[in-house]
Amino acid sequence: MRRLLPVLVAALLVAAPAAAVPREKWDTQVFSLVPAPGYPAYVHVHTNGRVYAGTYISSGSTVPSRVFEWTKDGALLRSWRVPGQHLDEDHGVQVANQTRRGRLVLLETSTRSVLTLDVTTGRFRRVATFPEGAIPNYASWGPGGALYVTDYGQGVIWRLPHGSHTPQRWLESPALAGAIEFGTTGIRYRPGRHDFLITQQTVSDGSDLPTNGALYRLPVRDDGSPGELETLWTSQPGDLPDGFGIGRSGHLYVALAGLSNQLVELTAAGEEVARFPDAPLTGDNGSPIPFDTPCSATFLGKRVLVANQSAVEGDRTHQAILDVYVGEAGRAPYLPRRATL
């Protein structure tokens, strides 16, 4: 047996899988390329463990938007064509959230609609339509099981009450109007603080330069009405802050969809901790695909998934979901029991 022991040990060492190489903070990898029509929007990590994203298309293309589904390891599984779009206009679909029962909540721009998609049957359903001029962008569940939706085209946050099919103007503010059509983007409700965090691409109410964006805190009063907007952070000119994720530490990881092509890490109080990459503009993140209009940052484990839209250049080789390791787990978006449509 003594003679066999070294042989057995050697065999076990050969058979043992290699230890995973620890990832350093900001290490960036390609999660998946996004097939045609490209232009991925917000990345949604579902409670079923899968990953979903929709696509945006300019009026120069008559190809319908699609909703894509991936495994948590980035393997493309299925996709669905979005019905009923106005294909002669700019059209896009944001997989903005999900219901408690697992249906995807979609925001479609050309018809200004809230849709649901049952991923088990592939059935789409139109739930609500916003008034003319609205550009529904991001959505968060909030108090009372209502759905709160940002409007990229107007200074409005819409509220779709539980059980209703009629959006209400919950908050209208010059601080949300935006300049040169760069309006309100991400929104997340924090139930422990009874507030929303909201990102604004450009500030046009005179409180700052119109080229700067902002992170706002919006408290919700006991009666469900909005409190006063508070500016937690002001971006650099041309950053265009977009979608964001919230870590267990309370830190925010915000995608900057503008010229900087970076992610910024903020404390819960809005103090800027870091930017990645250090140098703006090039988007050089160390992966084969640079940041090119990064427009969301969604937690999956200790990494954030970034939708790389390439909105200006339209570079199909850059239209991808990128995986950025940040070293902490995220807080799941608020999903109350009454999150139904």
Image (spheres, rainbow, N blue to C red):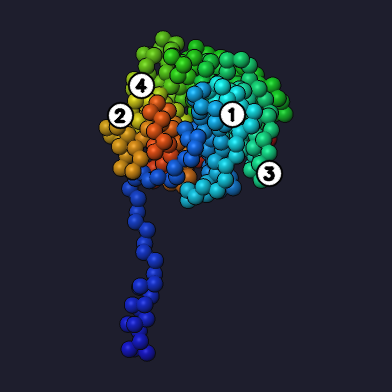
Say what amino acid the circle numbered 2 marks.
Answer: Leu
Say what amino acid the circle numbered 3 marks.
Answer: Thr
Q: Residue at x 41, y 30 (%)?
A: 314
Confirm whether residue 28 shows in the render.
yes
- Which residue bears the numbered disc 1? 107
Q: Could you say whether the residue bearing mark 1 is in a helix, strand or loop?
A: strand
In primary-sequence order, the first of circles 4 and 2 is 4
Q: CA distance from mark 4 to mark 2?
A: 10 Å
In primary-sequence order, the first of circles 1 and 3 is 1
Q: Is residue 126 left or right of residue 87?
A: right
The quarter in which the N terminus is drawn is bottom left
Say what amino acid the circle numbered 1 marks.
Answer: Leu
Q: Residue furthest right?
A: 163
- Which residue bears the numbered disc 3? 121
- Which residue bears the numbered disc 4? 238
Say what amino acid the circle numbered 4 marks.
Answer: Gly
